[in-house]
Image: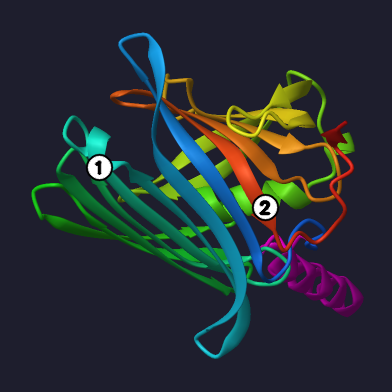
């Protein structure tokens, strides 16, 4: 009996380690900078609407070495007259892609929202604290405990870059828990296959892996983002199709520096 108890304790300790869902980073490094042109579908015409920047650097979070990634989207002054968007998403996570903290500050059409998520890991469970401020200024706070891993949009995107594509079958999905607003929702990532993609401004072409990011909460099955990542060791997002409340926005890569690996997916 003692031997069985010892084995169970060892197995439980293994679960506690795995509960953080570490995944070794093969795709990005400190100093990676990705710049995008942002386009909106305006009266059935695609118009350049602003810029987006995706940056990753080494950082420190609560005394712990970490990575910080942040995505900034800005509409141009011309489009601001019709629809202003100022979004900043920031995420801190460990070197093996375990989320630590997430923040989203969004001003879309004059409506301001703010999300914050704090992650901790104890006794085999993921513990999440959330703070959400809605456009009216009302603040709600929630706490959740789960035996499953929980992510936010940025940490999940960075994690996906290091996932083994051989674990995906075309048309099949992987399911995750994501902190969003003041709740934990169910989302899925579906692999759509490979596609050659041309950048709108630079005309560069990349061989890409295509994924769709779905909200699968309740009876809904709504595609939120379709992202195109290079079919090389960087798994660099070169195009993002974002399905927003007010329409569709697309981001096309215009420049990339500080990459970890050679860009072998570039079609000559």
In the foreground, 177 or 262: 262
**Discs 2, 1 touching: Cβ within 8 Å:** no
- Nearer-N-terminus badge (2/1): 1
On screen, residue 262 above or below 260? above
User: Residue 213's quadrant in the figure?
Assistant: top right
Magenta stretch prevailing secondary structure: helix
Question: Where residue 217 appears, x then y in whole percent?
Answer: 44, 30
On screen, residue 124 above or below 158? below
Q: Residue, x 83% and y 74% (percent of image)?
A: 10
- Is residue 244 visible in the rendered image? The answer is yes
Left or right, 112 with respect to 218, comes to: left
Question: Where residue 266 appears, x then y in whole percent?
Answer: 83, 37
Question: Which quadrant of the figure contains the C terminus?
Answer: top right
Q: Residue, x 28% and y 24% (percent of image)?
A: 246
Bounds of the magenta span? 1-23
- Is residue 148 visible in the rendered image? The answer is no
Question: Which quadrant of the figure contains the N terminus?
Answer: bottom right
Residue pointed to by mark 2? 256
Q: Residue, x 81% and y 67% (percent of image)?
A: 11
Left or right, 252 with respect to 245, comes to: right
Left or right, 71 with respect to 43, comes to: right
> What is the crowding at mark 1: few (fewer than 14 residues within 10 Å), some, or many (at least 20)?
few
Left or right, 228 with respect to 80, comes to: right
Q: Can residue 52 be found in the magenta stretch?
A: no
Q: Can residue 13 be found in the magenta stretch?
A: yes
Give the alpha-carbon distance from disc 2 to disc 1, as whole Å.
24 Å
| Number of numbered labels in the structure image | 2
Question: Where residue 72 appears, x then y in whole percent?
Answer: 43, 53
Point out which mark residue 165 bears: none
Residue pointed to by mark 1? 77
């Amino acid at each position: 009996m003692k031997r069985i108890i010892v084995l169970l304790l060892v197995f439980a300790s293994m679960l506690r380690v795995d509960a953080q869902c570490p995944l070794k980073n093969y795709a990005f490094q400190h100093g990676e900078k990705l710049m995008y042109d942002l386009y909106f579908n305006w009266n059935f015409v695609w118009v350049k609407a602003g810029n987006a920047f995706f940056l990753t650097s080494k950082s420190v979070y609560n005394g712990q070495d970490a990575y910080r990634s942040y995505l900034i989207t800005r509409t141009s002054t011309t489009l601001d007259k019709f629809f202003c968007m100022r979004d900043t998403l920031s995420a801190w996570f460990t070197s093996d892609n375990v989320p630590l903290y997430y923040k989203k500050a969004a001003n879309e059409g004059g409506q301001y929202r703010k999300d914050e998520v704090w992650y901790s890991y104890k006794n085999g469970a993921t513990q999440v604290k959330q703070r959400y401020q809605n456009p009216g200024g009302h603040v709600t706070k929630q706490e959740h405990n789960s035996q499953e891993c929980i992510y936010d949009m940025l940490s999940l995107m960075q994690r996906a870059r290091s996932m083994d594509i051989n674990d995906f079958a075309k048309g099949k999905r992987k399911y995750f828990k994501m902190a969003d607003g003041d709740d934990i929702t169910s989302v899925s990532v579906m692999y759509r296959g490979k596609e050659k993609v041309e950048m709108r401004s630079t005309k560069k072409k990349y061989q890409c892996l295509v994924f769709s990011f779905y909200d699968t909460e309740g009876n809904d099955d709504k595609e939120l983002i379709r992202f195109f990542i290079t079919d090389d060791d960087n798994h660099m997002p070169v195009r993002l199709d974002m399905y927003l409340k007010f329409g569709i926005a697309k981001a096309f890569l215009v420049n990339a520096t500080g990459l970890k690996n050679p860009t072998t997916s570039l079609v000559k």
